Image (cartoon, helix red, strand yellow):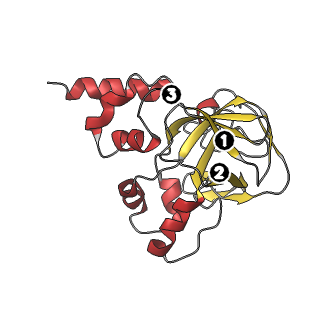
């Protein structure tokens, strides 16, 4: 059964553009999950977590970030080191769950009460590259196209490590987080597939519409 392996909260530290919360470490016990409200407050969907680049992180459409343990494991031989849960800055490290393969708009129940909705892929940034300290990290991460998924909170409650994760609904389309990531990075020919995906944040749909219009003959 798909499982929440760990819940990872920010340990603030220095980054290339000031304080960063990309250093996420597993925490014990229950964590409250609720919609954080509009971007700009520094809040995420997990009580006790913080983001500091408030113009690009946090808010309802990026309330939490999930990455699969299986995908971290696949990176380890290439990087030549062990990767702890939370090392990619993810709040939720999962097991047995398709994360990059999840459909945009798919909903997950975590534990008894919390329901989360898949919203968009993670796009790598300079803070992530500095944190990983790997040569050419942004290009390598982009080429692998296994970005993990941001989530919005549909139903709040408490979660804890070990909780089961159940996919409770899937939308009637075939746009996965992986497809959305490739469209927004290396494969702009895929952008028209994003335009009508209602669960995708409005800013990304608008971006897809504009770029699709520019590339049309």
Q: Position of residue 172 (x, y in %)?
A: 46, 26
Q: Where does label 3 land, which residue?
A: 171
**Which callout, 3 or 2, points at the residue further toward the start of the chain?**
2
Alpha-carbon neighbours of circle 1 within 10 Å: few (<14), some, or many (≥20)? some
Q: Where does label 2 land, which residue?
A: 2
The image's mark for residue 120 is: none
* SS state under label 1: strand
Q: In the picture, residue 46 is in which quadrant?
A: top right
Quadrant of the snapshot with the C terminus: top left
Residue under the image location 38 percent in, 29 percent down: 194
Q: Are marks 2 and 1 in contact (CB under 8 Å)?
A: yes
Q: Residue furthest left?
A: 217
Viewed as shown, does residue 193 lie left or right of 71?
left
Residue under the image location 54 percent in, 56 percent down: 16
Camera-nearest residue between 52 and 154: 154
Residue 29 sits above or below residue 133 on the image: above
Q: Residue furthest front?
A: 1
Q: Position of residue 135 (x, y in %)?
A: 41, 69
Viewed as shown, does residue 90 lie left or right of 142?
right
Q: Are marks 3 and 1 in contact (CB under 8 Å)?
A: no
Disc 3 and disc 1: Cα gap in Å?
Answer: 15 Å
Q: How many marks?
A: 3
């Amino acid at each position: 059964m798909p499982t929440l392996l760990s819940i990872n909260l920010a340990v603030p530290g220095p980054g290339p553009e000031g304080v960063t919360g990309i250093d996420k470490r597993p925490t014990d016990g229950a964590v409250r999950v609720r919609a954080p409200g509009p971007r700009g407050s520094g809040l995420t969907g997990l009580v006790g977590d913080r983001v500091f680049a408030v113009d690009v992180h946090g808010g309802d459409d990026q309330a939490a970030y999930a990455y699969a343990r299986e995908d971290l494991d696949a990176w380890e031989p290439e990087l030549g080191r062990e990767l702890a849960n939370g090392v990619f800055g993810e709040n939720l490290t999962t097991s047995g769950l398709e994360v990059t393969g999840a459909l945009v708009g798919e909903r997950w129940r975590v534990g008894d009460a919390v329901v989360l909705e898949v919203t968009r892929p993670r796009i790598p940034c300079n803070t992530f590259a500095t944190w990983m300290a790997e040569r050419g990290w942004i290009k390598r991460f982009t080429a692998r196209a296994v970005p993990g998924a941001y989530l919005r909170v549909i139903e709040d409650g408490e979660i804890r490590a070990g909780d089961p994760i159940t996919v409770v609904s899937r939308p009637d389309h075939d746009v996965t987080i992986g497809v959305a990531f490739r469209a927004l990075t290396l494969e702009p020919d895929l952008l028209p597939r994003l335009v009508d995906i209602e669960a995708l944040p409005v800013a990304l749909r608008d971006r897809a519409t504009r770029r699709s219009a520019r590339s049309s003959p």
